[in-house]
Image (spheres, grey):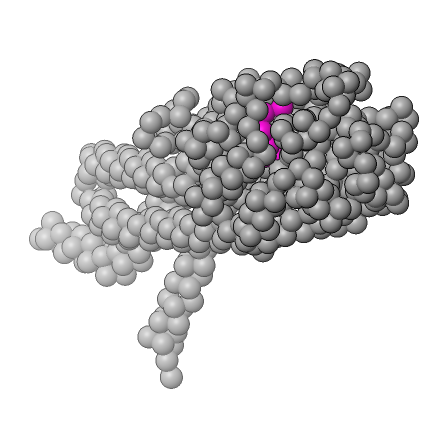
């Protein structure tokens, strides 16, 4: 009887336990497990994302060390384009493993502690603990799942923002360049460049990045495989890196994409004096820049090297060497910043005279498409009527200056050939300007054959037409080009170190449309005058 | 330009962690408010 009573009391206590304490204990256990699981997830997230060094680092995909052929870049993919998903998966996997360990260890503890020797007294606690474990695992799993979903949502939202921001930045960069009429052309192949390739700025790396624009490899900056950061757009500072043409891999001008480009092709027959004239123009720019608060900066090493070479020859009064016709010319590129106004990148092209005789080779000169002003150099010594009008003494004196008679092409032939080719490239020459530079004024200015010709455009035109019989060429020039002006030029440097003022006058006309104005007080000064007129403004 | 990064994703990971934490806190806050409303409506109504 006593056992029955004890049994009934035991049953009553168990029932009372389940009725009055079971629920709250179950809820407490469940809440503890749920909070514990969320804590585990957040702790894992902290260890993966924040703690350094991470005890559970997420795998990071290493970028290739060289630019692979399939268009992959030697840079880390932007966080939201690969690594974010890897971090999310890694965090979830590690956190799930830790939660499972907790459940397993808790189950073992419940078994060992609550279903052992004192089983009659502890089994209700064990049952509640087991139920709490199950409920806690379910609730905790749900809450952890919710946090993981929040994590994934954050990743997806930021990824979407990164995409939008990347394309907004691209649009702004392109838009700003369009508004400022800045286009990028390669000075070697002269293809238009949508966006340059850049080398990694780290001295120990220097790997080429083909397309650094915002995208999968970075929005504001990208990280090279050597972990060096690089800006992704010109407005973000990529112009400070060395740029390369994506078409021909040659170096572009320094700070390319920051200034409007001005293209000036120098056309003319072999040994017409194109190279000398071009070098004198750059020299004049240099002089004027230092004298009048403007600035001239060589846009690349090639231009600086060639300029120094030609400058030495001009200062010494020697002839420049003929331009090689073996390859398409590379531009002489200089940045010109007037005292007031915006900076311009001036590309002056000096193709070999022989190219004008070859239609196919002329078609290689793609830069002609971008020019709005052309400079045509006429060497009077290549005109038969001029040469035959000289006295024997004058011919003997000038023989060394005359182009090789075997390679002489008349200016008319060279102009017609050049004009045809330019028009074949669909250049609207009727909207372009043509400056005709009658060269070697320093040698020929005092000759009787040029007596009475003043340096005005009209006078030179009349002389070329009436005295030298170039009427057809002049008519063709006037017919094909929107505006034509004639200049005598003397590509020489005087004793006072100044370039002849005829060069400045020529430049004033050539660059007028591009708002690069050069003036000299003696606009009509002739090259034969020993001292050039002082430059008054730039 | 050439500042070398030890961890290329350091700053962005910190941002994601902070935003996730804020998001979780917001969800917990909303859950607690909803639960308290339910408790109030269920056990202390009237």
Please tell me which residue lies in front, A316 or A139. Answer: A316
In the depicted structure, whether residue A407 falls above or below residue A130: above
Q: Is residue A95 left or right of residue A405?
A: left
Q: Quadrant of residue A491?
A: top right
Please tell me which residue lies in front, A173 or A310. Answer: A310
* Residue A130 is a magenta residue: no
Residue A458 visible to an observer of this rendering: yes
In the depicted structure, whether residue B13 falls above or below residue A201: below
Quarter of the image that includes the C terminus of chain B: bottom left
Look at the image and give the residue range highlighted in magenta: A266-271
Residue A162 visible to an observer of this rendering: no
x 51%, y 31%: residue:
A356
x 34%, y 45%: residue:
A37
Q: Position of residue A502 (x, y in %)?
A: 79, 37
* Total residue callouts: 0
Q: Position of residue A358 (x, y in %)?
A: 45, 29
Q: Quadrant of residue A203?
A: top right
Please tell me which residue lies in front, A457 or A18. Answer: A457
Q: Is residue A70 left or right of residue A209?
A: left
Q: Quadrant of residue A500?
A: top right
Q: Is residue A538 left or right of residue A37?
A: right
Quarter of the image that includes the N terminus of chain B: top right
x 51%, y 39%: residue:
A416
Please tell me which residue lies in front, B2 or A193. Answer: A193
């Amino acid at each position: 009887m006593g056992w029955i009573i004890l049994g009934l009391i035991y049953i009553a206590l168990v029932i009372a336990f389940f009725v009055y304490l079971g629920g709250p204990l179950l809820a407490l256990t469940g809440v503890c497990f749920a909070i514990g699981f969320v804590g585990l997830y957040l702790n894992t997230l902290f260890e993966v994302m924040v703690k350094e060094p991470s005890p559970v680092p997420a795998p990071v995909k290493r970028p290739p060390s060289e630019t692979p052929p399939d268009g992959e870049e030697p840079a880390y993919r932007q966080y939201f384009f690969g690594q974010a998903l890897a971090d999310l998966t890694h965090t979830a996997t590690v956190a799930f493993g830790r939660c499972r360990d907790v459940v397993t260890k808790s189950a073992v503890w419940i078994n060992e502690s609550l279903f052992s020797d004192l089983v009659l007294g502890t089994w209700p606690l064990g049952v509640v603990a087991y139920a709490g474990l199950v409920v806690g695992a379910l609730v905790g799993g749900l809450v952890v799942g919710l946090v993981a979903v929040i994590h994934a949502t954050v990743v997806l939202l930021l990824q979407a923002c990164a995409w939008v921001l990347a394309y907004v930045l691209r649009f702004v960069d392109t838009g700003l360049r369009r508004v400022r009429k800045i286009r990028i052309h390669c000075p070697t192949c002269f293809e238009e460049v949508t966006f340059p390739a850049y080398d990694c700025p780290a001295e120990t790396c220097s790997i080429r990045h083909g397309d650094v624009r915002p995208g999968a490899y970075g929005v504001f900056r990208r990280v090279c495989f050597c972990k060096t950061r690089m800006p992704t757009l010109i407005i973000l500072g990529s112009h400070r890196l060395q740029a390369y043409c994506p078409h021909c891999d040659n170096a572009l001008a320094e700070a390319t994409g920051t200034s409007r480009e001005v293209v000036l092709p120098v056309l003319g027959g072999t040994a017409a004096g194109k190279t000398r004239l071009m070098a004198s123009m750059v020299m004049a720019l240099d002089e004027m820049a230092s004298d009048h608060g403007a600035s001239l900066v060589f846009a690349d090493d090639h231009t600086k090297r060639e300029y120094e070479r030609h400058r030495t020859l001009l200062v010494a009064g020697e002839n420049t060497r003929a331009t090689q016709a073996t390859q398409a010319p590379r531009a002489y590129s200089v940045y010109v910043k007037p005292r007031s106004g915006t900076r311009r990148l001036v590309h002056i092209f000096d193709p070999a005279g022989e190219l004008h005789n070859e239609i196919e080779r002329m078609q290689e000169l793609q830069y002609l498409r971008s020019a709005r002003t052309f400079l045509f150099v006429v060497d009077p010594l290549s005109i038969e009527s001029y040469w035959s009008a000289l006295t024997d003494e004058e011919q003997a004196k000038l023989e060394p200056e005359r182009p090789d008679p075997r390679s002489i092409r008349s200016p008319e032939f060279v102009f017609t050939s050049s004009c045809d080719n330019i028009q074949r490239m669909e250049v609207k020459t009727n909207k372009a300007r043509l400056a005709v530079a009658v060269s070697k004024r320093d040698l020929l200015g005092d000759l009787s054959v040029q007596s009475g010709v003043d340096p005005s455009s009209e006078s030179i035109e009349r002389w070329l037409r009436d005295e030298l019989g170039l009427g057809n060429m002049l008519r063709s020039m006037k017919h094909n080009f929107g505006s034509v002006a004639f200049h005598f030029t003397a590509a020489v440097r005087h004793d006072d170190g100044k370039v002849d003022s005829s060069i400045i006058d020529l430049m004033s006309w050539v660059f007028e449309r591009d708002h690069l104005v050069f003036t000299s007080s003696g606009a009509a000064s002739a090259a034969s005058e020993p001292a050039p007129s002082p430059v008054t403004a730039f | 330009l050439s500042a070398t990064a030890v961890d290329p994703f350091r700053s962005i990971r910190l941002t994601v962690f902070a935003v996730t934490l804020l998001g979780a806190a917001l969800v917990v806050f909303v859950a607690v408010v909803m639960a308290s409303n339910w408790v109030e409506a269920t056990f202390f109504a009237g």
